[in-house]
């Protein structure tokens, strides 16, 4: 019998939002790995995932959104030996139409048409979530 106590694997949970502007372009951010990604970040203890998505979109772009529905969950390996559990929500913009503003967390911010997403340097899981949101909105 093994007397070693069970130690569960732990990994961060990152909640992301898929949000479109009035021209149906998706909001994306460029990270330090030169990849495009969805706005989002770490789920805080006691925070509802949808609230996390809305908070992170606001912090990283200045846009106010309402998050929901859940689009996808998946495990991402951004670098070897690092795993992040990704949760994505479709988000609806609230308030006036305004240009997004890049935060200090990212190198660049962009708005991309549906047909431009496939060619971007971006994890496939994010591309899948974007496609799901377009389909959900009847734009797919």
Image (tube, rainbow, N blue to C red):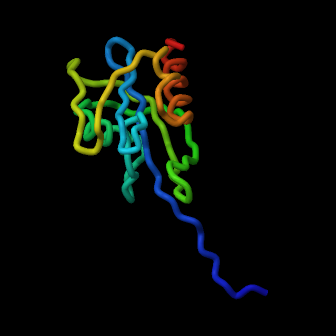
Q: Residue at x 56, y 59 (%)?
A: 81
> Residue 68's quadrant in the figure?
top left
Image side of residue 107 versus residue 118, left or right: left
Relative side of 70 to 21, left or right? right
Rendering coords of residue 135 (x, y %): 54, 18
Q: Nearer the viewer, residue 68 or 9?
A: 9
Relative to 46, say whether 21 is above or below. Answer: above
The extreme right residue here reads 1
Q: Is residue 57 placed above or below 134 in the rendered structure?
A: below
Q: Please determine whether, in this image, residue 140 is positioned above or below residue 108.
A: above
Q: Nearer the viewer, residue 42 or 117?
A: 117
The residue shown at (37%, 47%) is 41
Residue 39 x %, y %: 36, 37
Q: Is residue 124 left or right of residue 34?
A: right
In the image, taking residue 99 as reference, residue 122 lies left or right, namely right
Q: Residue 51, can we see it?
A: no
Q: Position of residue 51 (x, y in %)?
A: 36, 43
Q: Residue at position x 29%, y 33% from top?
A: 108
| Location of the N terminus (image quadrant) | bottom right
Q: Is residue 59 visible?
A: yes
| Most distant residue in the front direction | 34
The mark tally for this picture is 0
* Residue nearest the viewer, comparing 16 with 33: 33
Q: Quadrant of residue 111?
A: top left
Residue 31 pos. (x, y %):
36, 41
Residue at 52 percent across and 36 percent down: it is: 123
Q: Quadrant of the C terminus?
A: top right
């Amino acid at each position: 019998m093994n007397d070693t106590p069970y130690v569960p694997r732990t990994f961060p949970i990152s909640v992301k939002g898929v949000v479109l502007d009035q021209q149906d372009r998706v909001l994306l951010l460029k990270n330090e790995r030169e990849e495009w990604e969805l706005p989002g970040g770490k789920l805080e203890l006691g925070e509802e995932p949808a609230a996390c998505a809305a908070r992170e979109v606001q912090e990283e772009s200045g846009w106010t959104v309402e998050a929901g529905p859940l689009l996808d969950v998946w495990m991402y390996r951004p670098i070897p030996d690092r795993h992040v559990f990704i949760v994505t929500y479709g988000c609806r913009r609230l308030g006036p139409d305004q240009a997004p503003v890049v935060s200090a967390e990212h190198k660049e911010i962009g708005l991309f048409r549906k047909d431009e997403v496939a060619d971007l340097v971006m994890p496939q899981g994010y591309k899948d979530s974007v496609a799901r949101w377009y389909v959900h909105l009847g734009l797919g």
